[in-house]
Amino acid sequence: MARLEGSRWRPTIKDVAAEAGVSLKTVSRVLNLEPGVAAATSLKVKAAAERLGFQRNETAAQLRRLDQSSRLIGLVIEDLANPFYSTLARGVENVVRGAGYLLMVASSDEDPTVERDVLRALLTRRVDGLIIVPTGPDQSFLLPEIVGGTAIVFVDRPALSGRADVVMAANAEGAVQGVTHLIDFGHRAIGYLGDDQVIATARDRYLGYCDAMASAGLVPDEAFVRLGLHDTAAAEAAVNELLEGEPAPTALFTSNNRITVGALRAMRRHPTPVALVGFDDFELADVVDPGITVVAQDVGAMGRTAAELLLSRLRSAERPVTKVVLGTRLVVRGSGERRP
Amino acid sequence: MARLEGSRWRPTIKDVAAEAGVSLKTVSRVLNLEPGVAAATSLKVKAAAERLGFQRNETAAQLRRLDQSSRLIGLVIEDLANPFYSTLARGVENVVRGAGYLLMVASSDEDPTVERDVLRALLTRRVDGLIIVPTGPDQSFLLPEIVGGTAIVFVDRPALSGRADVVMAANAEGAVQGVTHLIDFGHRAIGYLGDDQVIATARDRYLGYCDAMASAGLVPDEAFVRLGLHDTAAAEAAVNELLEGEPAPTALFTSNNRITVGALRAMRRHPTPVALVGFDDFELADVVDPGITVVAQDVGAMGRTAAELLLSRLRSAERPVTKVVLGTRLVVRGSGERRP
DNA sequence: TTGTATGCGTTATCAC
DNA sequence: GTGATAACGCATACAA
C-alpha cells in the first residue's frame, strides 16, 4: 500500500506575506478581519493564503494575545463510557462549542490521583475553564488556579463550597420522592442499593432513603442496605443476596443507573417479583417489562447549565458564586407500583 | 456569596529563575530533567518553582519545540450521547492518555459542514493526530493535513481509501450472519430497517441483508425495507408501519443500536411477536424479555485499535497504510430464535 | 493604508 | 555546570 510522506512543513503568515508581497502585519490584519486594508490588498493576501494552504496556528496566537485565552474547555468526568456522563458531556459540548470553545474530555475513574493528573495536564494546556465531576474529598489544590484566572464549575457533586460554582441534582429530595413512592404503595421492607459513601451523591441519596423511612415511622433494616456498589456486577451480586435472604425485601431502591442495571439482571432470575424504583432514568426503562419507575434527572440540562455557568464566569470573574440545584422528577412506569 | 478575584497572573520560568537566583536556561534544564545540573542548583530551582506555584505553559513549549508536537489528539464522532460513540471514545481515551496525550472530542451530528468546522478548529490547535468517524462522501480536504504531518485514522467507516489508516467492522458479513440466522429459523418475510444510505455502514449492512436473502433464494419484499431511519423515533414509526401491514414480516433485522431501540418500543405495543436480530449490542439486550439476539461488534476495541494505529503512525509516518477489519459476533439471546 | 519593532513563555544554540 | 541570546508564529504598539 501507499506510504504517507509528511513533509511536516506548514506555511506561516510570514510565508503568506512573502507570497503576497506585503508585510506580515498586513496579512495579520486580513486574517483577523481588521479594518483599514485596501480591498485589493485583502484579495491579494487571501489568494496567497489559499495558494499556500495557510492555516493559522491558534496556539501561537494565544500566546501573544493579551488575555491569553485558549478557547479550550476541559471536562473531567468519571467515565465517558457511562451513558450518564456521556449525556452530560454532550450537554456541555453543545453549549461551549456554540460559544466557540473546543472541549477536552478526560475520565477520572473515580480515582483522585488520576483526577489530579488530568487536571494538571489540562491546566498546563491553559484551558480557559474546567467543568469537573469531583472525585475524592478535597479539591483545594485547585484554589490557586481559580485565583490564576481559570474558571471552574463543579457538576453533579459539590466541591470547594462557596469558592466555585456548582450544578447538581436534588439528590436527597429525589431519593425521598422515590422511597416515599414505594412506601405509599404499601412497602415496609425496602432494600437500598448504593454506591461508595465517599461519593457525595451516594451519601445524599442514602440520607434521603433514611429520611423517607423515618418520616413513615419505619426503621431501615440493616440487612436490606447494601452500600459501596460501584459497578453493575457488584449491584447484581448484592441484589441476588437480598432477594435470596429470609426475609427478603418487597421493594428495592437502586440509587444510580449502574446499580439499576445490575438489579434488573439479578431480578430476571428471581421468580418473586419485587417493586423497584431507580435513581436516574435510562434509555430502555420504558421497554423492559414492567417499565422501570425512576427518579429522573435531566442530565443533558445539567451539562448545559454547567457550561452556561462556566461561560458566564469567563465573562465576569466578579459574579457571586452560584449553586444551581436541579429538581428531579418521578417517572411512573410500573415497576414501582407493584404492591407487596 | 463570595466573589472570585482572579489576579490572572502566572509565574513563568523567568520568575522562577529570579526567585532561585539562576538563569532562565537552568530552570528549563531542571524542569525538563536535562542532565548537567548540580544537585544543589536543582533543589534550589525546584523549591523556587514550588514557592511560586509555577506550572509550565505547555502551549509555549510546543511552539518552540522542534517537532512542534502538541500531545493533543482530536476525535470527531457523530454524537457523544450515543452509547456506541461514547464507548468508542472511551476506548480511544484509554490508549492515548496512556501514551501521554490529551483528547479533544467533538460531535459532528452527521453534518459535513459541522465536521469541516470542528476539524478546522482542531487543526488550528495543531493536534498531533485525528481519529474521525467520517461524515459525507468526501474527506479529500484532509489530504494536505496528512502531508502537513497530522496523523489521521478513520474509524467505523472508510475514507480517503489507501491514503489513511482505517478501522472498521465487517459490516456486510455481520449483516449476512444476522439475516442468515433468521432465515435458518424459518423466516422468509424478513423486514430490514436501515439508516441513511449515504452512511457507509448503512450501505454495507443493507448489502449484507440483500446477499443473505439472495443466497437463500429469497427476494426481499420492498415493502419490508425501510431506509433512512436516523433516530429511534423514526425507527419506531417505521416498525409500527411494518407490523401493521398486510402481510407483515415475521422477522426484523434492525441495523444499528438506535434502530433496535426504536423497534423494541414499537414491538411492545404489538401483540403478535416477531423475531428480531439487531446490529450492535447494547447494555440491556440481555435484560429485556426475550433477550435480544444481536450481531455484536467490540466497540471499545475499535476505539483502542484506532488509537493504537494513530500512535504508531505518529511514531513512523512511513508505515504503509493499514486497514483493520474487526469481526462481528452473533450473540444468541432469544429474540432471533422465534419461529414464524 | 501599510510597515517595523517588540514580546508572549518556552526550547535550542552556542558560548563561557 | 551555567548563562546569554535567538527563535517558534503570531498579536500588539506605534511609526510612517
Image (cartoon, coloured by chain):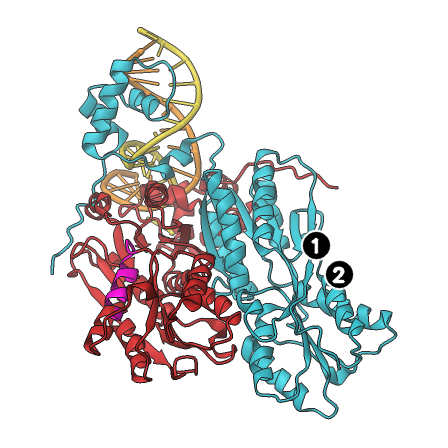
Chain colours: A red, B cyan, C yellow, D orange
Front-most of residues B328 and B68: B328
Q: Position of residue B129 (x, y in %)?
A: 53, 44
Q: Are marks 2 and 1 on the same chain?
A: yes
Q: Would you say residue A310 is visible in this rendering?
A: no
Query: In the displayed image of the protein, which residue is found farthest to the front?
Result: A246
Residue at the image position 64 percent from the left and 72 percent from the top: B195
Element marked by disc 2? helix
Report the residue marked by disc 2.
B173
Q: Earlier in the sequence, mark 2 or mark 1?
A: 2
Q: For mark 1, does the 10 Å Cα neighbourhood hold few (<14), some (14 to 19), or many (20 or more) residues?
A: some
Residue type at the position of mark 2? Glu
Q: Amino acid at mark 1?
A: Gly
The disc at residue B327 is: 1
Closer to us: A49 or A146: A146
Q: Quadrant of residue B16?
A: top left
Placement of B284 over or under B149, stated as above or below: below
Query: Which residue is at the far left?
Result: B1
Return the chain for callout 2.
Answer: B
Residue B251 is labelled as: none
Left or right: residue A89 compared with residue A198:
right
Placement of the C terminus of chain A among the 4 image quadrants: bottom left
Q: Position of residue B253 (x, y in %)?
A: 69, 74
> Which contiguous range is marked in magenta?
A197-209
User: What is the x, y in percent for residue A185?
Assistant: 33, 84
